Image (cartoon, rainbow, N blue to C red):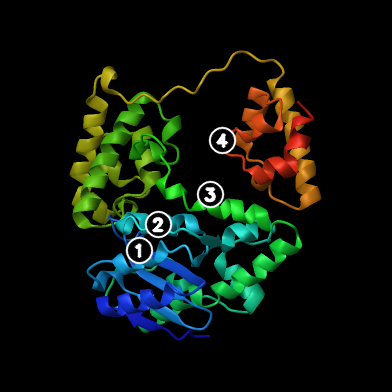
Amino acid sequence: MASAYTLITRHEDLSALMERLSKEPIVALDTEASSFHRYTERICLIQLSTRDTTWLVDPLALPDLGPLGKALAGAGTEWVIHDADYDLRMLKRAGGHRVLRVFDTMVAAELLNEPELGLAANLNKHFGVTLDKRFQKADWSKRPLPEDMLAYAAMDTTYLIGLRDILKKKLEDMGRWSWAEEEFAHLVGIPYADTGAEEPGFLRIKGAKVLKPRQLAVLRELHAWRDSLAERLDRAPFMVLGNDTLIDLSKDPPADMAELGKRKGVGENALQRNGTAIMKAIQHGLALPKEEWPRLERPKRYERDDDYEERLKRLKIVREELMVEHELRPGIVCPNYVLADIARLLPKSMDELTALPGLRNWQVKEFGARLLSVL
């Protein structure tokens, strides 16, 4: 089922649209980005829907998104987004645009313990709509975008307000609307939260933190080479050389080009184009003296506590009971890292429990007494 839409490519049309949407109480929003194809992740399309009309905004054809930013900051509009965390971060990156009020349909589905959280599954369940999965990892930076891709994008927001209405009614009926309100209020601040110094990119690769220091030195060099080439080509780094391949080459560095060519993930083209540079990065990492090897920060040490594991076990049993009683996923009742903090820090009151990072007021109110009772 195709969705009708209007494509916005001129600044004056964007300004007029935002003037109109700023008066709407509810607007659905989604973004399509270039993360799977380009080095610099950027928003390539913005979908916007009221209850009866859909627009597609092309940021690549516009001088700036200032009118959108002004509309997003309006306190009178609720912006409905599925999995809002990513979109809110992208909007901030695109120009510091900040949403004041949000309704995240994925978070709502989590709080209702819906069996599937994806947008496609929920649209199919509630509206019988089937999204075309061909375009989930498409290159949205290409121009012109074909008609079938634009129609697919429009579907993402066309039914979103209707989904919001269904989920909100269920939340209210189950007495969980206040839970959602707190989660939504938390979401809008996440892109602006101070998370401290960012971890180096090579350490964020899955499997990096189990490598030995010398292997980490090789990984750091390979990652720096790949990042530099990806930026120059404006391609996603994994398209230059996959993360699994970087880990494999760091764990067991090949001795020469012939051995490099036999490694999984290093095709003939990559060997011909980049083989010399890859081997140079590996050899440079291997040649570094010990004092220049990367060192992982040691995990925080705690005083010996012989009862910690037993307390944690009791807390997990209580969480299991609460999950069954309320039909919720484990992380919604209480995330593992918070359970560990409770077991280790031994909060003595609901106020002390509320002060723990990662625990919402609604979780303390609903589950706090039961969790404290087993300490």
The x and y percentages for residue 275 are: 22, 46
Q: Residue at x 55, y 61 (%)?
A: 104
Between marks 4 and 3, how big is the CA–CA gap?
Answer: 13 Å
Q: Which residue is mark 4?
A: 357
Where residue 371 appears, as percent x and y from the top left, is: 74, 34
| Distance of label 1 from label 2 (alpha carbons) | 7 Å
- Three-letter code, disc 1: Gly
Q: Are marks 1 and 2 in contact (CB under 8 Å)?
A: yes
Q: Which residue in the protein does label 3 denote?
A: 186
Q: Is residue 183 above or below residue 282?
A: below
Query: Between disc 4 and disc 1, whose residue precedes?
Result: 1
The residue beneath circle 2 is 98
Q: Earlier in the sequence, mark 4 or mark 3?
A: 3
Looking at the rendered structure, the kind of residue marked 3 is His
182 versus 116 height, above or below: above
Q: Residue visible at 77% across and 51% down?
A: 326
Amino acid type, label 2 = Arg
Separation of disc 4 and disc 2 at Cα? 24 Å
The span from disc 4 to disc 1 (Cα, nearest Å) is 30 Å
How far across and down, in percent of the image, does residue 24 sit? 48, 74
Which label was assigned to residue 69?
Answer: 1
Q: Categorize mark 4 by other alpha carbons within 10 Å: few (<14), some (14-19), many (20+).
A: few
Foreground mark, 4 or 1, reads: 1
In the rendered image, residue 212, in percent from the top left (x then y), is placed at 40, 26
